[in-house]
Amino acid sequence: MKPITKSVVRKLFKMKWRVFAISMVVSLAMAMFIMGLYSAVIFDHSMDTFIEETNFPDVFVSLSEPVDYSVADGVVSNIEGIDTYSLRLKLDGTYHYDSDDYPAVIIGIEDPAREDISRLLLKDGELFNGNGEGNVIAGMEDIGAKVGEVLSFSTIGIDFDITVKGSVQTPEYMFASAIQDSSLPLPGHIVILYMDLGELQNITGFGINDILLNVADGQRDPVVGSLGSLPVSEIIFQEDHPSVVFMDIGAGKMRNMFPLFSVIFMVVGMISIFMTFYRIVMNDSRYIGVLMSLGYSRLKIAWAYMTFGTILAAIGSIIGMILGFLFTMGIMSYTMSMIGDIRVAYPMAPMPFVLGLIFSFGSVLISVGIPIIHITRQSVRQALDHKPKTKILTVGTAFSGLSKTRLMGIRNTFRNPARTALTVLVVGMSIGISGSWIVMADSAWGYMVDQVNQDTWDIRVDFSSPISNEDATSLLDLNETEYVIPFAYLAGQISGGGNSDSTFIVASDRVLETRDFELESGRLDLTTSVITNKLASELGVSQGDRITITVGAKTLETTVGGVVFDILMQAVYLDRDAASSLVDRENASSAFVKLQDKEDIDKVAAEFEEMEGVAKVTIQDDIINAMEETFGQGMGMLYFFFFICLIIAMVVAASAIIISTMERDIEFATLETLGIPRRKVIGSMLIEIGIIGFFSALIGLPFAYLFGKLFAIVMEDVLYYFPIVFAFSAMAITFAFGFLFVIGSSIFPIRYTGKLDAEKTIRERTAG
C-alpha cells in the first residue's frame, strides 16, 4: 500500500465517530431521495398489476332505473366494439349486525368464478356456488362480515340472509366507503356483498341496472354512444374510477412531493457535507503542505483525498440504499393497509437507486474537491502557514457570576461566529423541513373541516329510481325538517381546455341553499355552470370558457360561470333548465334535507331508511367523522416523516459538533489534568449545544412555514388546494422537538470526550 494511501486509511480509523456522522448524513438524505422515487414506481406497478390480474373493466355503466335482463342484453350484445361484458344488479342496502345497522352494497352477478372481466380475487374461503351464498369484500371482519357467518341484509324494504363462503378483493372496491363523491378514500364500515344474480332478481323483482364493458382499442366512444336506448345515469371509464384515481393521486403525490422534499434536503445535506469536509480538509492544510514538500504531486494528493471522500460516500451509499428500501417497504405497507390492503408488487426499478448513488457520490466528491483544489493550488509555504480562522468571544462583566466551565460553553459556541451561524442555518433548515409536515397537516385539516362545515344540509337521501320533485318533497317533508331540496345527480365526462376528466353533475334550482359556496373566481351563476376549483385546474379552464358534459349518449355544452372551492366533489353545479339536455327537470334522483334540530338526525335518518323507494341515506356528520379517521391514519405517516427529518437534523448537528469538539481535544485534556469534574465539562458542552439547538429551532419555524407553502403548492397540483396558515401548536411542536433532538446529538461529543486519553493527547499536540 502506498504511503499516501496509508495516510487516508489511518485518518479514517482515527475519526470513527466523524465517519459515522458524515455517513449517516449522506445515507439518510439518500434514503429519503430513493424512497420518494421508488414509492411512486411501486404505487404505479402495484396498481397496474392488480388491475391486470383482475381484468378490470374499461367502462362502468349505471342505469337510473332497472331494466329487464333481455332488454339490456339485447342492446349490449348488438353493439360492435365490445370484447366482453357483464350485466349486474347493484343495489344499496343495509347490513344488520348486533342491533346495529351498517350501509351495504348488494351486487348480483352471474358467475363469481368469471375471469375475463372484473375477476374476484379470493382472499379467504371459497367463491359462492348457489342460492343463499355470497362473498364479501375483505376488511369488514370486525363487524361480523367473515367466512362462515350468516349475514342479514335488507334492500328496498326486503330482508334476506346470506351465508358468507369467502372474502374477496377487487379494484372496484379497493376504497369501500359509505361516503359518495369524495375526492378522498374515506373509511367507514360498509359491507360489499356479491351474490347470485338470479336470486337477487327473485328477491327484488328487478332486472339489470349495472353494466361492465371491456371494449376494443379506439371503440370506447362509439360504444358509449350506442347505449342511448338505455336510461344511462352514469358512465365511468377505467382511468376515472375512484380506485384508479386515488392510486394515481397517491403515486403522483409520491412522485412529485418526495423528490421535491429530497431535493430540498439535498441542498441542506450538501451544505452540511460541504461544511464538514471543508473543515476536515482545510484543517489538514499543513499536512498537505508536508506531502507537497516531500515531492508528492498535487494530483496524487488530490486523488488521495478524493479516495478518502469516495470511501465515505460508499459507506453512506450502502447504508442509504438499505435504509431507502426499508423506508419504502414501511411506507408502502402502511399506506396499502390504510387505503386498500392489496398486495404490494416490487418492480425491478434500478433508476431511483442509481440517482441516489449519483447524489451521494456527487455531493461528497464536490465537497472534498473544492477545498483540496484550493489548498493544492497554493505554494508549499502557504499550505504550511495555514491557520484555522478562530475568533474567541470576549465575555463581559454581565457573565461574571457564571462558573468558568459555563463561561467556556458560551465562549465555545461563538468562538467561530461564521461557523456557528452556518451550523445553525443548516440544522434550522432540517428542523424546518420536519416542521413543514406538521404545518401542512394542520392547515389541510383545518381547511377541510371548514369546507365540509360549509354544507348546510344534514342528510342526503338517494332514491332507488328517479321520482318527481313533488313526490320527493312530500315524502321527506317531516315535522323535523327545515328544508327538502330535490336534485338530479349524474356522473359522466367533462371536457374543456383541451382536456377531459370524470365529473359529478348536480342539477337543482336551489343548490345554492345547500352550501355556503366560497368563490375562487367568477360568480354563482347556475344558468351557466359552477365547477369546483380542482376540476377547473385539471381541465385548465376558468370563467367564460366553454365546456362539454357527456353522460352516455347525452351531451351538454355550457359556459363556466364560476369556480368554487370544494374538496369533496369533483362536481359541476347547474340549475334544472341548464341541465335539461341531460336529465328530466321534473324528476329527482336524490334530495338534501336540513333539520330544525340536529339532535333528531339519527331518528329522522332511520325513518328515511324505512321509506319505500329510498336506496341510501347519508348523514353529513359521517363525512366529517370519516375524514377525521382518514387524517388520524394519515397522521402516522406524517409523523414518521417528521421524526425522520428530526433525526437527520440531529445527525447534521452531531456531525458539526463532533468536528468542533475534536478540534478542541487539547482543551478537554487540559481540563481533565486540572481536575475539573467531568460533569462540569459535560455541562459546558450541553450549554454550547443548547444554544445551537435553541437558535436552530427558532430559525426552523420560518423555514417550516416556507417549506409548508412549497409542499402545499405541489399538493394542489396532485390532490387539492388548501392554504397554509400559521398555527401556534404546530410551531410549538416544531420548536420543542427540534430543540430536544439537537440536544440529543450531544451524546456523540460527550462519548468522545469520555474516551479521550488526556496524557496521549497533550503529548502528541505539544510534540507537534
Image (cartoon, grey):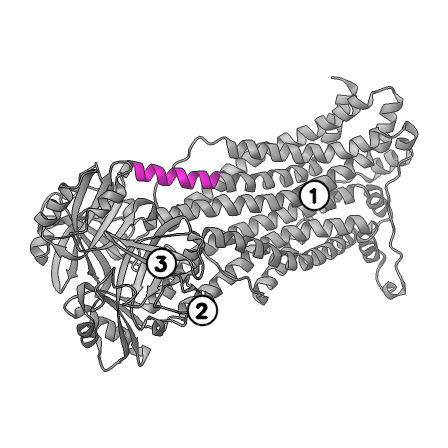
Q: Is residue 716 left or right of residue 678?
A: left
Q: Nearer the viewer, residue 617 or 690?
A: 617
- For badge 2, the amino acid type reads Glu
Counting from the top left corner in percent of width and height, residue 654 is at 69, 46
The segment highlighted magenta reads 38-52
Given the current orientation, which residue lies at the most extreme top position?
1
At 87% from the left and 66% from the top, the residue drawn is: 398
Q: Please tell me how crowded label 2 is: few (under 14), some (14-19), or many (20+) other residues with Cα within 10 Å.
A: some
* Mark-to-mark CA distance, 2 and 1: 45 Å
Counting from the top left corner in percent of width and height, residue 227 is at 19, 49
Tell me whether the residue at label 2 lies in contact with that at label 1, contact meaning CB atoms closer than 8 angstroms: no
Residue 703 can be seen in this image:
yes
Counting from the top left corner in percent of width and height, residue 555 is at 27, 55
User: For residue 473, what is the image quadrant?
Assistant: bottom left
Q: Nearer the viewer, mark 1 or mark 3?
A: 3
Q: Which residue is mark 1?
A: 272
Tell me whether the residue at label 3 lies in contact with that at label 2, contact meaning CB atoms closer than 8 angstroms: no
Q: Is residue 469 left or right of residue 349?
A: left
Of the 4 image quadrants, the one containing the N terminus is top right
- For badge 1, the amino acid type reads Ser
**Residue 723 sits above or below residue 176 on the image:** below
Q: Which residue is mark 2?
A: 518
- For badge 3, the amino acid type reads Ser
Pick whichever of labels 1 and 3 is earlier in the sequence.
3
Q: Please tell me how crowded label 1 is: few (under 14), some (14-19), or many (20+) other residues with Cα within 10 Å.
A: many
Q: Nearer the viewer, mark 2 or mark 1?
A: 2
Residue 768 can be seen in this image:
no
At 88% from the left and 20% from the top, the residue drawn is: 294
Q: Nearer the viewer, residue 351 or 561?
A: 561
Q: Which residue is mark 3?
A: 182
Q: Which secondary structure type mostly characterizes the magenta part of the structure?
A: helix
